[in-house]
Image: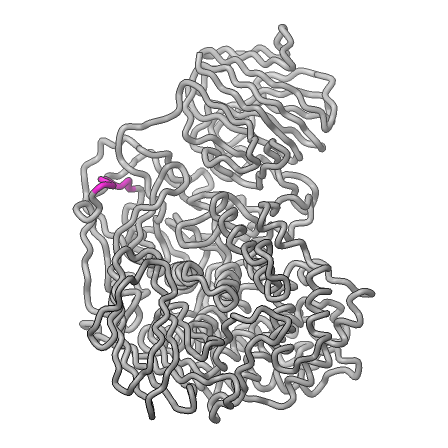
């Protein structure tokens, strides 16, 4: 059946600070009080903004899918069952119920759905009616500040929607208790990492009540939390040893907003700029094409086969949503749209009944098995209501509802600001009258946004319109007259007296763009959408759950996926054909998505599934030679697929570094030439180091490879320090590197200071083979200059410029490949890498 074309419209009503909203939104808009930063936007009350068109469809799918059935899917007392502790039972739901409720309340009042409201109300009522006399709420046995933080977000949303008189005194009493007890029971673990959530609620309440102790509380929370401003500004995510929280990607995503929230108290650039500095650092070292970083669950480097967790997606989005109101920069809206239109829908099945705990940029099958991630789950990429660790199945519900409720803001100059564009409907008074703005668009699947204003009487106020930075030729017309000087990446302020039937047209022509990715590969974008190879799917429901219609689903590719692109980057419009079709009800369905791309490609036979038969090998270093025939391939939006290739090699004559390679790490920044394969690596004190896992070790076989190098005969020198038990050293002639201790082909020279042993061996058929070893008086935390001389099948290993080789051996299995570093259950450091071809 031919998809029905849909249109979308937004209806907006705005209120000045002193005006109380009508029954739909009874709470009052309270801008920042002194001494807080004054030029800050604020949320419109929950329920003001309604989704329409394709966006409404996502919310409706949530209700009929995982959100609407969550309490049936997870009925245990430690989950969302009637015996959960958050309902007075004997269970231990901890963060699960607060996470769920945070998204449920936002969804219920955005949809204005009585059934969902009733589900939320029992949790709200029990908690509001059972606060302890001292102010503490939640289970008395729950000695943890953290789970109460997401519950406070749920209460904030609930109050905005209902104006329930119980909420403000309830929160005031609790936060007063918190301030009085933080010295005796300071923040720790998750609460220490995620205190920015607590701070945001405290400042929201301060603007309601004016109680000065709330500002004191925020200062106390800031002093006890991780030093997130330092971490973001100075790229210190790996600086905390076995304490994983500052590199746990969900916590990092939540803490992106920490410094910008605190910048309302300390307005110095150090806090105001820290979030974007942190994002820049993260994306440079760990960035993925869909707009955020790898994290499985820890930061995992730039990779085509490392994943992003569903919790990370929704938390990163919320951080951007919060930050835009405090620092209204158009680029924050660009970043938010990229994640929302690509990463968010990719985490879910198209009926919103399943999610995947991790989603990979190049995910060519969704089958159970080990990936070698720091936090590995057998079903971590398998679509299911139970994929991976339980956190995401509760936290994911806020993604689309928070996107809606944060799309438009009230501004302290009496206007409205828009951070993202999508079909919505918003209501509020403005300047003692009412305004309705109808938006007709299918953005981001079309390039024009049409606004029609209806007012009860003329009103003077500004509209702050975000102009996307990716659009090189934006155009804004008011009543048919073009506004001069509209620039990409600006917040355009149109301040005028508005009349009923005024019309605004925004034209944002979408341009094709090729973005550089890991291994000199590329991704393809058009406007805010990231595109991926269309892969036919073979879908198998392997398990049906007690709730009818919910399955665990395994997906295998039913078409080829190992393509390299034929691109002339100077003329993309000639290389890539844009094909537009009718707008379907849900554009995130592969076969009906309305804008696709066609271009030429060749298959790369050597690019295959890895030895575990679970994931593709990492994208090969580009350019790649291929003698295969030229084919036309189709690319579809990233969010419309369960399987995808997003990071593509390009076809051409290979261009490797073959004569010499040096790296001294003097700028304390991870070189773009080095690629992680398992574990974590970071730069500090002008050296590179392995990151510690929770057990204080590096993990088994973590590698960092200079994938753009190709050496056969060589002299390879580096300073190596082994700082714990385990071994570490140099790898060379490496090909087919993957995540896993022996997941590569190539040679390794490892130093073990505990046993005083130097070992020379190889990974062959995914097994470690010792070729030769020797005793040497190694000491922990002492640097040794290691030199490898490889000529054909002969290998010599020298330590500290000694003339006599410690090891001399022969082997003929591997002829050429890349160089890099490896560690096996060891904390290690390396510096002064120097490779010269012989």
For the point 36% across and 77% down, the residue is: 424
Pick out the residue farthest to the top: 803
Can I make out residue 592 in this image?
Answer: no
Residue 813 magenta: no
Q: Position of residue 97 (x, y in %)?
A: 61, 74
Q: How is the image coloured?
A: one colour
Foreground of the two, 53 or 419: 419
For the point 47% across and 63% down, the residue is: 384
Whether 644 is drawn above or below 313: the answer is above
Q: Position of residue 255 (x, y in %)?
A: 59, 59
Point out the image quarter for the N terminus.
Answer: bottom left
Write down the quadrant of residue 252 in the picture: bottom right
Whether 652 is drawn above or below 597: the answer is above
Q: Position of residue 704 (x, y in %)?
A: 52, 34
Please identify the dominant SS of the magenta region: loop
Residue 564 magenta: yes
Q: Position of residue 670 (x, y in %)?
A: 52, 37
Point out the image quarter for the C terminus.
Answer: top left
- Per the rendered image, the range of residues in magenta is 563-570
Write down the quadrant of residue 686 in the picture: top right
Q: Is residue 266 left or right of residue 407?
A: right
* Count of numbered circles in the view: 0
Whether 9 is drawn above or below 642: the answer is below
Q: Is residue 625 left or right of residue 417?
A: left
For the point 37% across and 75% down, the residue is: 463
Can I make out residue 470 in this image?
Answer: yes
Foreground of the two, 603 or 457: 457
């Amino acid at each position: 059946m031919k998809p029905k074309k849909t249109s979308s419209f937004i209806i907006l009503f705005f209120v000045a600070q002193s005006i109380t909203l009508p029954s739909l939104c009874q709470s009052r808009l309270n801008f920042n009080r002194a001494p807080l930063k004054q030029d800050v936007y604020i949320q419109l009350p929950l329920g003001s903004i309604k989704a329409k068109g394709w966006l409404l469809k996502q919310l409706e799918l949530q209700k009929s899918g995982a959100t609407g059935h969550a309490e049936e899917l997870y009925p245990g007392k430690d989950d969302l069952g009637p015996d959960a502790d958050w309902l007075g039972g004997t269970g231990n739901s901890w963060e699960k119920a607060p996470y769920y409720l945070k998204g449920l309340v936002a969804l219920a009042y955005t949809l204005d759905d009585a059934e969902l409201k009733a589900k939320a109300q029992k949790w709200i009522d029990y908690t509001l009616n059972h606060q302890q006399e001292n102010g503490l709420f939640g289970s008395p046995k729950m000695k943890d500040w953290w789970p109460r933080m997401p519950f406070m977000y749920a209460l904030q949303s609930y109050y905005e929607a209902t104006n329930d008189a119980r909420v403000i005194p309830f929160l005031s009493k609790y936060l007063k208790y918190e301030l009085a007890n933080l010295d005796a029971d300071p923040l720790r673990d998750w609460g220490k990492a995620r205190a920015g959530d607590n701070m945001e609620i405290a400042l929201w309440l301060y603007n309601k009540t004016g109680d000065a102790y709330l500002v004191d509380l925020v200062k106390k929370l800031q002093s006890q939390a991780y030093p997130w401003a330092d971490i973001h500004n100075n790229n210190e995510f790996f600086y905390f040893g076995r304490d994983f929280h500052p590199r746990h990607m969900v916590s990092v995503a939540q803490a992106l907003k920490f410094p910008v929230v605190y910048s309302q108290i300390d307005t110095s650039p150090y806090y105001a700029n820290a979030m974007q500095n942190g994002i820049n650092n993260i994306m440079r070292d760990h960035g993925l094409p869909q707009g955020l970083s790898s994290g499985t669950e820890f930061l995992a480097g730039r990779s085509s086969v490392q994943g992003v967790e569903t919790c990370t997606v929704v938390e990163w989005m919320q951080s951007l949503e919060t930050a835009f109101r405090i620092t209204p920069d158009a680029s924050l809206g660009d970043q938010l749209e990229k994640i929302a239109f690509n990463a968010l829908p990719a985490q879910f099945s198209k009926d919103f009944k399943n999610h995947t705990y991790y989603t990979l940029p190049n995910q060519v099958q969704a089958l159970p098995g080990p990936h070698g991630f720091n936090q590995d789950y057998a079903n971590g990429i398998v679509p299911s209501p139970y994929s991976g660790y339980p956190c995401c199945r509760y936290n994911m519900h806020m993604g689309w509802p928070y996107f809606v409720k944060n799309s438009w803001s009230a501004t302290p100059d009496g206007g409205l600001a828009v951070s993202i564009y999508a079909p919505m409907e918003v209501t509020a008074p403005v300047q003692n009258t009412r305004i309705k703005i109808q938006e007709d668009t299918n953005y981001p699947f079309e390039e024009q946004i049409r606004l029609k204003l209806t007012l009860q009487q003329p009103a003077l106020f500004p509209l702050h319109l975000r102009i996307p930075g990716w659009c090189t030729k934006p155009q804004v017309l008011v009543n048919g007259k073009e506004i001069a000087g509209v620039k990409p990446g600006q917040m355009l302020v149109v301040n005028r007296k508005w009349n009923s039937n005024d019309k605004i047209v925004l034209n944002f022509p979408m341009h094709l763009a090729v973005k550089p990715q890991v291994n000199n590969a590329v991704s393809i974008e058009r406007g805010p959408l990231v595109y991926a190879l269309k892969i036919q799917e073979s879908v198998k429901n392997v398990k049906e759950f007690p709730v009818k219609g919910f399955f665990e689903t395994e997906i295998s590719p039913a078409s080829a996926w190992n393509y390299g692109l034929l691109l002339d980057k100077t003329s993309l419009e000639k290389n890539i054909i844009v094909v537009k079709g009718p707008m379907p009800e849900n554009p995130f369905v592969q076969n009906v998505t309305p804008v696709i791309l066609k271009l030429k490609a060749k298959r790369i036979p050597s690019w295959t599934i890895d030895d575990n038969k679970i994931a593709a090998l990492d994208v090969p270093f580009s350019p790649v030679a291929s003698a295969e025939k030229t084919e036309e391939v189709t690319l579809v939006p990233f969010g419309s697929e369960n399987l995808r290739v997003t990071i593509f090699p390009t076809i051409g004559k290979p261009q490797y570094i073959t004569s010499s390679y040096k790296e001294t790490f003097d700028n304390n920044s991870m070189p773009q030439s080095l690629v992680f394969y398992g574990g974590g690596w970071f730069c500090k004190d002008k050296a590179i180091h392995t990151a510690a896992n929770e057990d204080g070790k590096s993990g088994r076989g973590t590698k960092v490879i200079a994938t753009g190098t190709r050496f056969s005969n060589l002299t390879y020198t580096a300073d190596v320090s082994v700082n714990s038990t385990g071994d570490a050293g140099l790898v060379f002639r490496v090909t087919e590197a993957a995540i896993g201790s022996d997941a590569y082909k190539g040679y390794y020279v490892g130093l073990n200071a505990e046993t005083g042993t130097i070992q020379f061996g190889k990974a062959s058929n995914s097994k470690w083979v010792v070729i030769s070893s020797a005793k040497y008086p190694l000491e922990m935390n002492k640097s040794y200059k290691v030199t490898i001389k490889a000529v054909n099948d002969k290998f010599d290993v020298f330590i500290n410029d000694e003339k006599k080789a410690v090891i001399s051996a022969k082997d003929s299995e591997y002829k050429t490949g890349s160089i890099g570093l490896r560690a096996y259950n060891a904390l290690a450091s390396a510096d002064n890498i120097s490779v010269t071809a012989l």
